[in-house]
Image (cartoon, rainbow, N blue to C red):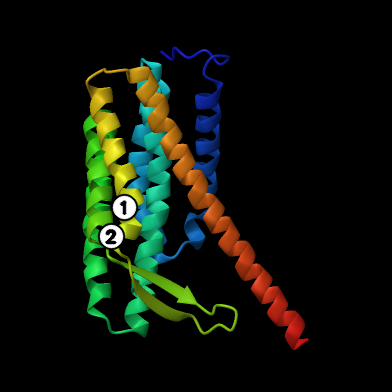
Amino acid sequence: MIKIKINDYSIVASQIENSLLFIVQQLKLLVSMTPIARIMFLLFFPACLGILAQAIYGEKLTHQLVAMGMFVFCIEQSRMAVKDLELVKYAKKQVKDTRVNIFYQITIITIITELLGFYLSSLWLGWGSILILLSQVWFNLFANIRINIVDKVNQLDKVVVKSWAISERSPVLIADFTGLLLVSLWMLNIASLWISWGLFSMVIVYCSIKLTIFSLQVIEENFQVSSSKDASG
């Protein structure tokens, strides 16, 4: 039985509603997805549903908040898995660089560990969250390159492989270790209400930043395409 008062927990209810709408939209897009996107969707989707059940039917608000954060994070990580695998697939066709093969292996291990963590979160939220965060530490420690596709305006799609220094990764690693600490304290019931709000807020801020960056990139690409057409016309 759900023990949530709408007036008190409107933020959680709003996030659940938005997440359900996202799921419906993803189902509609499933047919038009690329093979990689379709596979990732089918792998991550059951785990997302399991975590969403934890968010809805959790007996305590602290449990619901952490579960809701993991649910949103599961959606974001499935998107990132598709993005990374698509980039690697395209990069392998364009460049011969052993770093790309290493990056691919690291990405696969990360995705497998993430999936184990998300499915574990459906049963034991705390331990599953720790495994998820450990997968992020693994990736951000050893994925020392970035793959970018440039010059999309002229449809050249040039692949650029750049080194990703540990100093550039340090803010993300600090966030990962902070998350591990907070989840550990939450499992020990130390200031669980404040920590659960903190974890939930961290996920929302993280996903909002990623969404903003993605939106700005789309706007920039559309502007460049529009400018190119105007110049050619």
- Residue 108 - label: none
With respect to residue 16, does 105 lie above or below? below
Q: Amino acid at mark 2?
A: Ile
- On the image, which quarter does residue 219 sit in? bottom right
**Residue 211 visible in the snapshot:** yes
Residue sitting at 39 percent across and 42 percent down?
73
- On the image, which quarter does residue 46 sit in? top left
Query: Percent position (x, y) of residue 192?
Result: 32, 19
Query: Percent position (x, y) of residue 64?
Result: 39, 23
User: Helix, strand, or loop for circle 2?
Assistant: helix
With respect to residue 42, does 91 lie above or below? below
Disc 2 + disc 1, Cβ < 8 Å: yes
**Residue 58 visible in the snapshot:** no
Q: Amino acid at mark 1?
A: Ser
Disc 1 target residue: 170
Judge by depth and name the residue closer to the eye, 141 or 204.
141
Query: Percent position (x, y) of residue 79?
Result: 42, 54
Residue sitting at 26 percent across and 67 percent down?
104
Q: CA distance from mark 2 to mark 1?
A: 6 Å
